[in-house]
Image (cartoon, helix red, strand yellow):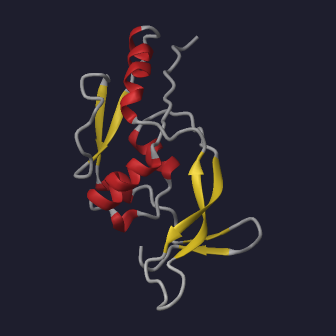
Amino acid sequence: MPPRRPRTRVNVDGLNFYHAAFRRGGFADHKWLDLVRFCERALPRLTIHFGEFVEHAKRQWLVHPPVGGPRTAEVWVPEEKGSDVDLASLIEPVRMAREELGQTVGVFRVEGGQRRCIFGGHVDFIRTVRRGHFAAAQVPPGLTDSHGRRISKPREW
C-alpha cells in the first residue's frame, strides 16, 4: 500500500484576504479570482469547505444622500455565519493542532498586503502568495450559469 499523502485544509478569512490582496497588496486587477484554483495552485492537496452566509437587513448611511432626502437606507448585508472571529483567538487551537494532534499548520501571506502576521512563531510555515498565484487562478472573463444566463467580469475589474 502506498504511503498516505497528507490532507490540506484551507480556511480563508474573506475580509482579511480581500483587504490584504486587493486593497493593500496591489492585486486589484486580479479580483476575478477562482479561489479554489488559487488555493490548489498554492498548496498541492486540500479539502474545500465553504462557509455559510446569512443576510440581515441593516440601516446604512448613504454615500451621496439626496438634498432634502433621507440620509440612510435599509440594505441587505451578507455575513458569514459563525466565522467572524478575532484571529488572535485562533492561536490556542493552532497550538493544539500542532502539539497535541501533530498536525502541520501554515499561513498564506499576501505579498505586499499583509500586516504583521500574528501567527509567526506559532505555525510550521508561512507561504507568501504573489502576483503569479493570482494571475494563474482567474475565472474566465465570461461564463454561462445553469440557467443559460451570461456572467461577465465587471469592466472596472
Side of 73 relative to 124 (left or right): right
Q: Residue 136: name its quadrant.
A: bottom left
For residue 146, above or below residue 94: below
Q: Nearer the viewer, residue 88 or 30?
A: 88
Is 136 left or right of 129, judged from the image as shown?
A: right
Instruction: Say which residue appears at 47% left-offset and 83% top-offset.
Output: 65
Residue under the image location 50 percent in, 21 percent down: 5
In the displayed structure, would residue 8 be above or below residue 137? above
Depth check: 54 or 120 in front?
54
Give how far across and how far down residue 58 sits, in percent. Answer: 59, 62
99 is higher (above) or lower (below) than 123: above
Residue 72 horizontal side relative to residue 145, left or right: left
- Where, by quadrant of the figure, is residue 63 drawn? bottom left
**Residue at left offset 43%, top offset 14%:** 96
Q: Quadrant of the C terminus?
A: bottom left
Q: Is residue 135 left or right of residue 153?
A: left
Residue 144 horizontal/vertical position (percent): 67, 70
147 vs 50, nearest the viewer: 50
- Residue ID at (22%, 39%): 116
